[in-house]
Image (cartoon, coloured by chain):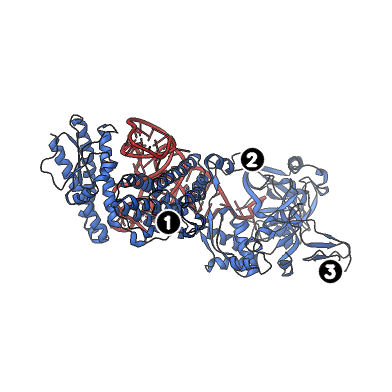
Chain colours: A blue, B red
Amino acid sequence: FVRLYEEGLIYRAERIINWCPRFMNAISDLEVEVENTPGKLTYVRYPLEPAEGQKGEPGYIMVATTRPETILGDTAIAVNPDDARYKALIGRYAIVPIMNRRIPIVADAAVEKDFGTGAVKVTPAHDPTDFEIGQRHSLPSIQVIGFDARMTEAAGAFVGQDRYDARKGVVAELERLGLLDHEEDYTIPLGHCERCGTVIEPLISMQWFVKMAPLATGALGAYRYGQMRIVPERFGKIYTDWLENIRDWNISRQLWWGHRIPAWHCANCGQITVAREDPAVCAHCGSDRITQDPDVLDTWFSSWLWPFSTLGWPEDTADLRRYYPTSVMETGYDIIFFWVARMAMSGIHFLGVVPFNTVYLHGLIRDEQGRKMSKSLGNVIDPIEVMDEYGTDALRFTLATSGTPGNDIKLSMNRIMGNRNFANKIWNASRFVMGQTEEIGGGIPALGALQPKTLADRWIVSRAQRLTGEVTRLFGEYQFGEAGREIFEFFWSEYCDWYVEIAKGQLQDAKLREPTARILRAVLDHALRLLHPYMPFVTEEVWQHLYAEVPEAERPASALIVAPWPVMDARQLDAEAEEGFALIQEIITAIRDTRKHAEVEAAMRVQVILVAGARASLLKREASLIEQLARTESPRIERKLATKPEQSMAQVAGGVEIYLPLAGLLDVARERERLATQIETARGQIERSRKMLDNPNFVSRARPDVVQKERDALAAAEDTLAKLEARRGELG
RNA sequence: GGGCGAUUAGCUCAGUUGGUUAGAGCGCCACGUUGACAUCGUGGAGGUCGGGGAUUCGAGCUCCUCAUCGCCCACCA
């Protein structure tokens, strides 16, 4: 405050400010909430004073107002200088109704010709625009509404009345005097106190202000020249628009809590002393009859110093040197003006450097109906209660993954419940993995140190690496929600549902026992690290258990929260394994589906015959997976089959023919129906692909790999169709 | 008055360089086999991506326009 005052950037002046009559306090423009409220536009005739030498009825000038009670404080009527209708009246006088005060008719460009009557009553004490007009034309201000929203002595007969009672009274009186022309329904943008909802009264008051224009320049430059990036980008425009149209900031508040304004008023000479230390005497006349200004500072006047005042500023501390400027400021978009823009301004002004390189803005959390949470509405969700019921990690994960940057989130209890289940899944899977692998040993190797053996091993390691790359990329783009969802997907659907299930089989195999245990643990460790920012508590707890047997010196870190963030190792990306495993997954799912259709009992092992062409050798190697996960007998795998199995259900998945011989269980009619559906699907695909490939423009203009992909898809679909049709023929 | 966002499955939402058959959670239907997890597993049903137009070989995604909802800014009394 003192520095800005000394630099001439803080001044004290009488201005129109937003006054909350309930709190008896001034508030800044940002704390006023404008609401369109139904009201009336009242047309009032002001008698004109006769011009010199004029004879007969001098007539009237008509104005429109939404606040008739302010008529009592009018000190002029203004018209637009270019308005032909009123040109002759400029410089003449009118009489304020009721008060019978003589006021000038002035010309001011602020008046819109096309609104109302084109003439406006001017009440400098109760309207910001009127105040400015008053300044330009040296008009007196007459305050007719007091700080308690009651009429003052200056309001004559209305003294003591509430502002709204006075409004009614004034209208009635105008009517009685025959000066009320008419009233119209009109929607009025009405300012309310953000905190208590009371209608704001614009009043002239002596307050402290900060000159903002010089400060805004730096904050604008920092954004425009790329020193400060705003994510998502669209908020940058909101930031610059505000700074470009900045108005001075009223920083004094008539409250008794807050930082007191370091200014002392002298009763002797009337001057002000602003000082860092409490002064004993007036700096101007030496009198000891000084009293400190009773006002305190707007809370944001402290907050805008936050990026450096928290680091020990104005001392030149080690913290300040190290942490200022910081990299990312994360906050809600609703306080871009209150806080972000002002921090940028103060940081640049006091330290010469923007306080953060990136501002990441998140959305607001709303209730399940999308309403803003508010105490008066009673729809505030208490995070403590949610955490008690579902856990902190579940809430945190939900908030982090429910939306997209800068967009509001409707908080859904269902979603939180689902993520509670996820935390539970992590716990259970980890418990199982640790329980199964504890005695096998092998420690917890880094993912990159693994030598995956089986197809499933290669697949899960590759998937984990790919995920790591993806998450890192998304973090770089501030796509935290998408990154979290992908980790969720990997952990639950790939690691738990597939790999852990497969590992149950591999752990039975003496040769695979140890490597499988190592992979289980390494991938778990890896996934925990990726997940830690989203679910710090469960992951940390599990991680501590995971490393419980590892000597302190051999651990990568004392705790997960400080463990190294994973980096993708491209050498372990294994497209071939991913493709091969996808085929196995497809076949297993198809067999399961067929079993369900045939209503085969879940416990029953079924026979299966796979006709796989070139993929036969792959399937032979991975037969045990199919056996285990699709609950089949040892599958019979052929490259080709001359005679197709009779009395069996069939399906084609990834080009592989799948037969389940189900003598006695086969319902030929239903099977035919099922085949028909599949055939239809295949035909649809073929039609689609043909249409594209028959279009010479597609072939010549699309990227070659896209065309090739389409050709492959067509070939695959045709192959599938041929197989399905052959099958239908066999069914007879 | 100016600007921004949203509109995708019954519900809540993803889908960011335009490219096979648009995904998830919840809900729904059916079934539950070897004890990590029923806060679970398996399979399934369900969407002409708000309307219209344009660009393109190709649009949920780009452009124009309209509609509905929401938000921000704003001194036409």
Q: Which mark is residue A419?
A: none
Snapshot quadrant of residue A463 = bottom left
Snapshot quadrant of residue A575 = bottom left
Secondary-structure class at tag 2:
loop
Q: Earlier in the sequence, mark 1 or mark 2?
A: 2
**Residue sticking out furthest to the top:** A664
Task: Output the chain of dot 1.
Answer: A
Between A31 and A62, the residue placed more toward the observer is A31
**Residue sticking out furthest to the left:** A642
Residue A699 can be seen in this image: yes
Assess disc 3: are there few (<14), some (14-19) or many (≥20) residues with their C-alpha within 10 Å of its C-alpha: some
Task: Work out how far the residue at label 1 is from the one at label 2, CA to CA, in angstroms.
Answer: 41 Å
Query: Residue A719, position in %: x, y?
Result: 18, 48
Query: Residue A72, position in %: x, y?
Result: 77, 48
Side of A22 where B9 appears, left or right = left
Task: Work out how far the residue at label 3 is from the one at label 1, CA to CA, in angstroms.
Answer: 62 Å
Query: Residue A578, position in %: x, y?
Result: 30, 53
Task: Output the chain of dot 2.
Answer: A
Query: Residue A62, position in %: x, y?
Result: 69, 49
Side of A722 where A31 appears, left or right = right
Disc 3 marks a residue whose amino acid type is Ala
Snapshot quadrant of residue A319 = bottom right
Disc 1 marks a residue whose amino acid type is Val
Side of B48 where A641 appears, left or right = left
Task: Report which residue position mark 2 lands on.
Answer: A376
Task: Report which residue position mark 3 lands on.
Answer: A283
Residue A477 can be seen in this image: no
Q: Are marks 2 and 3 in contact (CB under 8 Å)?
A: no
Question: Quadrant location of the N terminus of chain A?
Answer: bottom right
| Mark in the foreground, 1 or 2 | 1
Between A154 and A528, the residue placed more toward the observer is A528
Q: Which mark is residue A471?
A: 1
